[in-house]
Image (cartoon, rainbow, N blue to C red):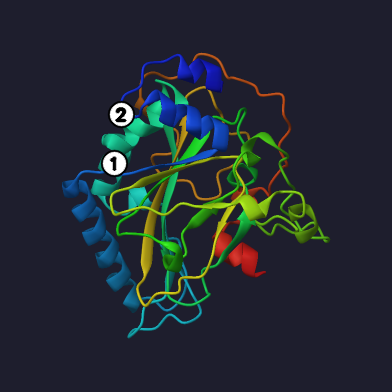
Amino acid sequence: MTPEDILEQPAQVLSQSQREQYFADGFLTIPNAIPAEWLGQLRTLSKQFLDSSRKFAASDNVFDLGPAHSLDTPHVRRLKALVDRHPDFWAFASNSPLTDIAADLLGPNVKFHSSKLNYKSPGGGEVVKWHQDISAWPHTNYSLVTLGVHLDDVAYDDGPLSCVPGSHNEELFVQRDAENRWTGSIKDEDLAGVGLDCAVDMNGGAGSVIAIHCRTVHGSRANLTNNIRALPLFVFASADAFAWMPAPSPTTKTGQIVRGEPAPFAHLDPRPCPVPPNWAEEGYGSIFTAQKK
């Protein structure tokens, strides 16, 4: 759906001014969006999976492990395919205030795309370079949003996500190096005109939800605290947005309708999108492994 069409639909949980701000900036922070019961369960599951990673020595289809990972000190960068790891993750993604927020930003007909839980450990290991999400999972249009949940209070020192206002309406960059290898990040020479000096940190208290448009330029700094910042992320699409390349991290729930009805027609946005690798053939680790290369 187009932003104009979406804004004509009645909102579920967001105000009209919040929706307008999202479409103007390409991102939005929604305070106090997740009830305490859900927040507590997400925290518990996050800690349980972090602890269970101790018995793993190498990355696999569940964990993306950092170089410092050990039995005594887990260093997990990502818990993959989150909704397939525990039924409550899928319950949260399919029937909670999070799904209502997705409908307010995508229209009444919404389908689930993907999910993960990123852990940002103290130090510089999980710095995320500037990038745009949609280049990794292109669709027939750009009505897709990533919704993240702050499990704890997040401020500057925690290394929050930062977004460049208005960048979702500007150029989509080819996220490859000079040898045409996928990097998952925007080249330095392309960043010169992006306006990084205007980037906004998506700080927020526990229970806040951050919404990022699929075309928005964003990244995150190092975690300067002594605590691990855990951020579950869920991607949703308007029902009329159809993927035209394999998903990098598909789940058993990818493509399922979570609000409204399936779309009888695809909405085709005329703006071009770079072609990513064929993940079904090449495989995909995580943005961390791609950017480290």
> How many numbered marks, from 0 up?
2
Q: Secondary structure at mark 2?
A: loop
Instruction: Tell me where residue 95 appears, x and y as whole percent.
Output: 26, 34
CB-based contact (under 8 Å), mark 1 and mark 2: yes
Amino acid carrying label 2: it is: Val
Q: How far is mark 1 from mark 2, CA to CA?
A: 9 Å
Between 48 and 124, the one lying in front of the other is 124
Instruction: Tell me where residue 66 appears, x and y as whole percent.
Output: 48, 74
User: In screen coordinates, is 135 left or right of 209?
Assistant: right
Between 78 and 1, the one lying in front of the other is 1
Residue name at image x 75 percent, y 48 percent: 174
User: In screen coordinates, is 289 left or right of 15?
Assistant: right
Q: Outermost residue toward the left?
A: 37
Q: Is residue 94 visible?
A: yes
Q: Secondary structure at mark 1?
A: loop
Marker disc for residue 13: 2
Quadrant including the C terminus? bottom right
Residue name at image x 36 percent, y 70 percent: 228
